[in-house]
Structure formats: structure tokens, C-alpha cells
Image (spheres, grey):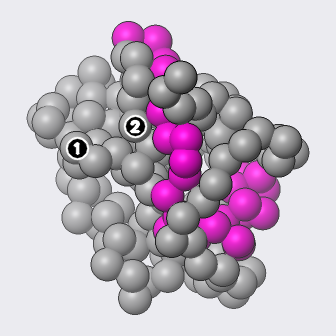
Amino acid sequence: MINMDKNITWKYDTQINDEVIKKTEEILAVVFPEDYKMFVKNHDGGYPDPNLYDFPGRKEAVFSDLLSLDRNSENSIVEVYFSHRYWLPAEIIPFACDPFGNYICFDYRSDKLNPCIVFYNHKLEDYNPHNLNFICASFTQLLEMLYGYE
């Protein structure tokens, strides 16, 4: 369950319905984690504030915005996936981005129902396994990691 006690404000987000989520899952041939589906219904395409997080090897990474499940959005999860699919390893699905063109992704390679979260560095688009760095075990954990400058 997503910790709503954490003081995160989502800007520029929209609501989507189960039909949009299901259609996106069909196009991408995945099942999104339940915590993500529940969350994105009310915050599709949103920008979090605070938006910083750390993971091994990187401090103050930036969670810029969620990719939209709305196919008509200019930042559509489907369009981003298909434009990067030749560089992404199989079963890696971007769902958020940073301001530098990198992506936060679901990694379905080990678990088809509970993917972990990885960081995809777009500057290393050479099929190098070092393009991906583990962030955390779930979408909820990622949201709990967000912090701002103090």
C-alpha cells in the first residue's frame, strides 16, 4: 500500500480509468503492479514534489514525471517504450523519466507480477547491461524514497 502520509504533491496529473490501464497492459504485454495501477488512476503523467531519490551509486537522482498511459499524451508510456525498445533489454518497461532523458523502469525479467524498479541510463544505448541500475523492489518503495532539499 502506498504511504499517503508522506508529503508528496503531484502536479499536472490527470485521472485515467481501468480501461486505459488494461489497454496499455495489452499493448506492452505486461501486467502492471497493483500499487502502480491504483496510484496512476489519479496521478497519470504527474510531476512529484519533492522529487529526489537516492539509489546505489547515485545521489540526488530526479524523478521528473510519470509517463502517461494516455496514448494521446506527448509523453506516452507506449510511445516511449516503442521508441527505445531496440536499446532496452527485453521485459524492461519505462514508466517515469528524469529531466536528462533517462528512465525509471519496471524490470519484469525475474518476476512477471512484481517487477523491481531500475534506472535506465539512455546515454549508454549499446546493449550494455550496465545501462540498468537497481533502485528498489517496488513502485511503493520508490515513492517512499522521494525527498526534497532541506
Q: Disc 2 designates what residue?
A: 62
Separation of marks 2 and 1 at Cα, in angstroms: 9 Å
Residue at the (60%, 59%) spot, across then down: 10
Mark 1 burial class by Cα count in 10 Å: few <14, some 14-19, many 20+: few
Res. 134 visible in picture: no
Q: Residues within 10 Å of mark 2 (few under 14, many from 20)?
A: many
Q: Are marks 2 and 1 in contact (CB under 8 Å)?
A: yes
State the residue in front, 82 or 54.
Answer: 54
Q: In this orientation, does residue 124 appear?
A: yes
Relative vertical location of residue 132 with respect to residue 16 in this rendering, above or below: above
Residue at the image point whose x is 84% and y is 42% from the top: 5
Q: Position of residue 98 (x, y in %)?
A: 34, 45
> Measuring 45% from the left and 56% from the top, which residue is drawn there?
65
Q: Percent from the top left, x then y, of residue 129?
A: 29, 25
Q: Is residue 109 depicted above or below 57 in this figure?
A: below
Kindly identify which numbered label has been placed on residue 118.
Answer: none
Q: SS of the residue at dot 1?
A: loop
Q: Would residue 134 appear left or right of 103 to someone viewing this image?
A: right
What is the quadrant of residue 83 in the picture? bottom left
Tell whether 88 sits left or right of 63: left
Whole-percent x and y of residue 100?
Answer: 22, 43
The three-letter amino acid code for the residue at tag 1 is Phe
Q: Name the residue carrying label 1.
A: 100
| Near-viewer residue (134 or 82) | 134
Residue 44 position by quadrant: bottom right
Residue range of the region highlighted in magenta in the rendering: 33-57
Q: Looking at the image, which residue sits at the far top?
A: 57
- What is the x, y in percent for residue 40? 66, 65
**Residue 46 painted magenta:** yes
Work out which quarter of the rendered image holds the N terminus and state it.
top right
- Horizontal side, residue 129 vs residue 40: left or right: left
Look at label 2 and name its amino acid. Answer: Val
